[in-house]
Image (cartoon, rainbow, N blue to C red):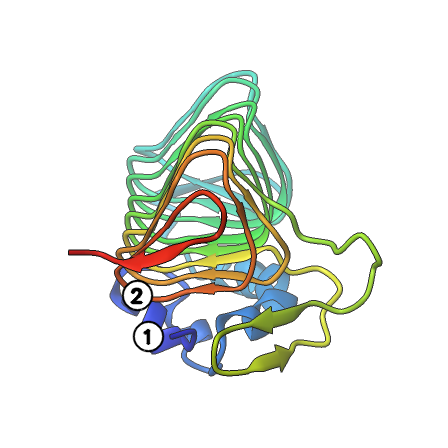
Amino acid sequence: MYTIPELYDLGHTAAKDYLTQFEYPWEALKGIKQMIIELGATLDPAEYTEVSENVWVHKTANVFPSAYLGAPCIVGPNTEVRHCAFVRGSALIGENCVVGNSVELKNVILFDHVQVPHYNYVGDSILGYYAHMGAGSITSNVKADRLPVVVHSSEEDIETGMKKFGAMLGDYAEIGCNTVMNPGTVIGRHSNVYPVCCVRGVVPHASIYKTGGVIVPKK
């Protein structure tokens, strides 16, 4: 339910070669910064402009004047980064993505066609192909007790050893407005989360996470 092949189609990210090194997606979080710097150096200057040191923007991307792009960062083709977006750094943003107004990104991989369009915080997380976070939904990436994050599932608990780990959203995951995904949350492919939920642990493939933590299979 939570390995990289179970969550993601790697044909929809420039991080494909990097991610194939790992079994679990959260293992990739520590090396995102260096991966982006190395990948950026290989980009075709006829297609990408290095707008500042280690910040590459595709010539078809639309970055609004008030958006901030911190290094290192790659913004893919036909992606829109809207007003007051705050890309703190270590962000690989794929093709045809939307990074909306007042959205904050930090140490993330966004696959192609990801939408984080309104007031989202996404930190230390990986969002799969066509994943969508509704307005105000966020990833919480540090536990209140500051202890390492544990991934909880119905089958086992996995000690990650990581103090910063937000959420892993599988391909086509849909997150409802004003939802909080607690540290170590994993949302399976084609799964939905109701609005205003507080999610913890693993939501299986093709499931619906309802208010109160009830999980039911999609019909």
- Foreground residue, 67 or 135? 135
Q: Which of labels 2 and 1 is toward the front?
A: 2
**What label sits on residue 6 in the rendered view?**
1
For this orientation, the residue located farthest to the left is 219
Q: How many marks?
A: 2
Quadrant location, the C terminus = bottom left
Residue 40 visible in the shown view: no
Q: Secondary structure at mark 1?
A: helix
Residue drawn at x 64%, y 39% as measured from the top left:
70
Residue 69: x %, y % from top left? 59, 34
Q: Position of residue 146 (x, y in %)?
A: 83, 59
Q: Amino acid at mark 2?
A: His
Task: Tell whether label 1 touches label 2 (CB within 8 Å).
Answer: yes
Quadrant of res 80: top left
Left/right placement of residue 157 relative to residue 19 reads: right
- Counting other residues with Cα less than 10 Å from the Cα at mark 1, is it few (<14), some (14-19), or many (20 or more)? some
Residue that label 2 marks: 205
In the rendering, which numbered label is found on residue 105? none
**On the rendered image, what quadrant is the N terminus found in?**
bottom left
> In the displayed structure, would residue 197 be above or below residue 40?
above
* Position of 80 relative to 114 (above/below): above
Residue at coordinates 73% horizontally, 76% vertically from top-left? Answer: 161
Residue 103 percent location from the top left of the image? 54, 30
Q: Who is closer to the viewer here, 40 or 136?
A: 136
Up/down of 210 relative to 177, above or below: below
Q: Amino acid at mark 1?
A: Glu
Residue drawn at point x = 51 percent, y = 73 percent: 153
Label 2, label 1: how many angstroms apart (C-alpha)?
Answer: 9 Å
Q: Few, some or many C-alpha atoms within 10 Å of disc 2 (few <14, some 14-19, many ≥20)?
A: many
